[in-house]
Amino acid sequence: MTFEEAERELQQIVERLESGTVPLDDAIALWERGEELYRLCRERLDAAQGKVDELARRVEEARPTTATPAD
Amino acid sequence: MGKVEAIDYGDRQVYTVSAFNRGVGSWLQRLPTVWVEGEISELRRQEPWQSVFFTLKDTGDGSILTGSMPRGQFDALRLDLRNGERVHVYGRPELFEQRGELRLRALGIERFGLGEHLAALERLKQKLAAEGLFAPERKRPLPRFPRRIGLVTGNDAAAKRDVIASVQARFPPARLVVAETFVQGPRAAEAVAGSLRTICAEPEVDVVVLARGGGSFEDLLPFSDERVVRAVAGCPVPIVSAVGHEQDTPLCDLAADVRASTPTAAARLVVPDLDELLASLARARAGLGRGARRSVERHAERLASSGTRLERAAGLLVERRRAGVERSAAKLRALSPLATLERGYAIVRHEGVVVRSAVALAVGDDIDVRVADGGVSATVTEGHA
């Protein structure tokens, strides 16, 4: 499942719950499913953030010294 | 005139003076009729005389020639000539036999003053211009660093000295080849034209300077001579004309690739100023370093800015998504029974269905119990209905 699919489903669940027409039994199941999707999205975002931070750190290390010439 | 006969004295043939003069006179009559230029002097005209007599003087070297013209013909010209005036005389040589004197027998006389002179020069100029000798598209650029510089100049020298001194002052390593020649008088035109050809034949001559100091209109005339103008126009390498002063415009100026107003100006045209050259080289070198450094800096800045933006863009994308997800999660929780569960309630489900009544269950049923932070599975052991 991609992040986008998970996010879309989470939004749909929220919308269905917001509409107030969902029977209680289903609502509990939807809530649990929502929580599951939320965890999935969090994991994906944390992984992406980790990669971005890692790349930024590497770029910082490799920054060319000519940008601040000595003379 | 009778036949010229010699008297025989044994094996020697001897002529009388009269016979000799007659013989020479008749031979002279075979010479063609020509135009002769000179200055009129000793003009003698008297009513009883059949002819008018005058002397023509060469203004160059003072050579003289006597001339005559029938009085009626002379009067008909209405020239009102004065001694000292320059004239062109159309005539042929003849011998005044009684005196054994050579004379120019004039058939026509034309005053040749400055006006006529200028008019003749103008005609020559028009003719040469029509041939394209002065055309701007014929002008060649001067070489920046001539291997050798040919200098055609008078042996007198102010002009020569000026050119040489200026060239050497500006560009000490310059090499000059000098051809000294007549720059004045009747032989000047041919001499200058010849010197130009000679100097162009010298090896490594990349530019030629024709220099002559100021002088009178007549002094500069050889430089308007057709032979000189053609030699200048035909010069195989670029040529600078530095003849006379600013206001003079001899025709060779028009045929040259560049005209210089003075010999010093000519020197400035044919060699670069060494000091200036070195200074400009130093400046260019400094500029080169600066330019290269600036270019690297600019690129580095752009790259750094791209890197920063890239990093920010990626971070921003993640943040935006995270905000979206967090918003959805917050709504999910607000709508969920989580708050209720956190107060200590639990949800019991049997086979996925929420249990609302104790009688809905039997002993032994498996149930799921959901509390705030999770859930447990249990089995019904006893009912209390």
Image: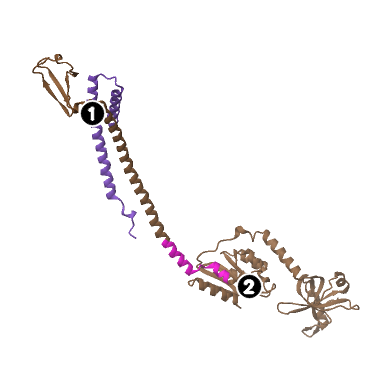
Chain colours: A purple, B brown
Residue B372 in magenta stretch: no
Q: Which residue is mark 1?
A: A35
Tell me: B351 left or right of B243. left
* Location of the N terminus of chain B (image quadrant): bottom right
Q: Is residue B16 visible?
A: no
Name which residue lies at 43% across and 65% down. Answer: B282
x, y (%) of residue B347?
A: 18, 22
Mark 2: which amino acid? Answer: Ala
Which chain is mark 1 on? A
x, y (%) of residue B123?
A: 72, 63
Question: Dot 2: what SS?
Answer: helix
Label 2, label 1: how many angstroms apart (C-alpha)?
113 Å
Q: Which mark is residue B191?
A: 2
Tell me: B120 left or right of B275. right
Task: Give the vertical position of B59 relative to A10 (above or below).
Answer: below
Q: Marks 2 and 1: which is nearer the front?
A: 1
Q: Residue furthest right?
A: B48
x, y (%) of residue B5?
A: 82, 79
* Location of the C terminus of chain B (image quadrant): top left
Q: Nearer the viewer, residue B363 or B298?
A: B363
Question: Dot 1: what SS?
Answer: helix
- Magenta part of the protein: which range? B264-286
Task: Give the vertical position of B323 relative to B171 (above or below).
Answer: above
Tags 2 and 1 in contact by the CB under 8 Å rule? no
